[in-house]
Image (cartoon, helix red, strand yellow):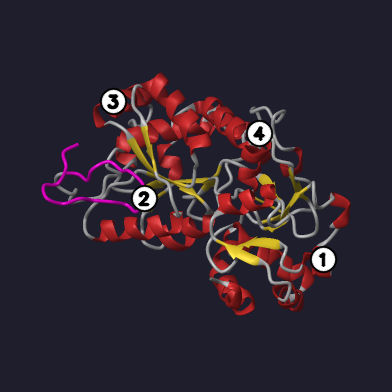
Amino acid sequence: MKKIAGLAISVAVFLIACAPEVAPQVPVSIAAAVAAPGAAWEQTWERVLNDARKEGNVVIVSAFGPEVATPLNQAFTMKHGVGIEFGTGRIGETAQRVIAHRKAGLYTVDLYMGGIPTGLNTLKPAGAFDPLETALILPEVTDPRNWLNGKLTFVDRDRTLFPYVHYAVLPLGINTDLVKPEEIKSHRDLLNPRFKGKMVMFDPTGPGASVAWFNVVSKIAGLDYMRDLARQDPVIVRDERLQWDWIAQGKYPVGIAPASTLMGTFTKAGARVQLLAIDGTFTGGGSSYIALLNRAPHPNTARLFLNWFLAKEGQTIMSQATLLPSARVDVSKDHVIPETLPKPGYFDAINEDFQIDLPNQMRIAREMFGHLLK
């Protein structure tokens, strides 16, 4: 794809394919590329394969780190001859830049792979998403029997955001050399004076699993508990990896609302860390949601990746890299972090009503913890 002369288009800290030489005058309709009624899915798939190789790499706004992005890119490129350009950095900030570029007529991103807050409260209201099911082709992807609870579950009523992972989001991470699991049986135990100034919390005042944690635990323990927790002076960070680094190093032996998806990276490296399933554990997808952007610059490559990724092969690679359970029932769970397997009784956060309240919860969290932000 040719670069627009004289215009350097940068989406924050990630590499992206160049914008089209001329922005499309009408939206690229994914549905228009679907085979006519009665045509076999094989014909549609073959056409998508051929056209994808002409379009080039798929561009994805992503929350993936290299431990997930690299094996996915290698496998996808080897199988289909086109690659993936994954985004990195803070996905909320990146999404704002994508919206700004779209307003300027620059459509440079094909897919979104991140959390609900940015997808549901930022990109979707900006009109960036197409219904996802219009792009699903492979029978092993569209067959509801291959998915948890016998259906394709979407976050929103418009069926644009799809959770390909369904796991228990555990509220605490600990360094087991310094804190034993039996020492923390509930959130109330965090009010023990020994933990004052010894905890690192992911920022609950912005998008992410931390504000979902805040919402769930506030309903269980009350807002007075949150005020008491703030008096324990937790250090607040906005970098998920830094939070786990500090837990693993023992600098802060207790982590509040850490990214469950990252713990496997640290345990593989030999860190003595553990997630705790206490009150406030809920089920969700973390940053593991996928959505299709309309007016995509590479519509067929986007469909190719989407179907490959949601099929058993792509989901197996993803699950093995993250150690999280795929929402596909035919993907092995043998390698999964046992604590992240959903159990009856956990609050299910994969629903639109819970998620659309999160901006309000961010405001309340700022009232509680804002003075600790640096």
Question: Considering only vertical position in the picture, is 123 above or below 342?
Answer: below
* Earlier-in-chain disc, 1 versus 3: 3
Distance from Cα at disc 2 to Cα at disc 4? 27 Å
State the residue in front, 153 or 368: 368
Q: Which amino acid does label 2 sit on?
A: Val
Residue that numbered label 4 is attached to: 268
Q: Residue at x 64, y 77 (%)?
A: 368
Instruction: Give me the C-alpha separation between circle 2 and circle 3.
Output: 26 Å
Q: Earlier in the sequence, mark 2 or mark 4?
A: 2
- Residue shown at 32%/43% (left/top)? 15
| Residue ID at (34%, 54%) | 12
Residue 77 visible to an observer of this rendering? yes
Q: Quadrant of residue 133?
A: top left
Q: Give the range drawn in magenta.
A: 1-20
Residue that mark 1 sits on: 194
- From the image, tell me which residue sits under label 2: 13
| Residue shown at 66% from the left, 58% from the top | 257
Q: In this view, does 194 lie above or below 335?
A: below
Task: Tell me which amino acid carries mark 3.
Answer: Arg
Marks 1 and 2 sit apart, C-alpha to C-alpha, by 39 Å
Label 2 or label 3, whichever comes before in sequence order: 2
First in sequence: mark 1 vs mark 2? 2
Type of amino acid at the residue the image marks with label 1? Arg
Q: Residue 53 carries which label?
A: 3
Classify mark 4: helix, strand or loop: helix
Q: Earlier in the sequence, mark 4 or mark 3?
A: 3
Q: What element carries label 2?
A: loop
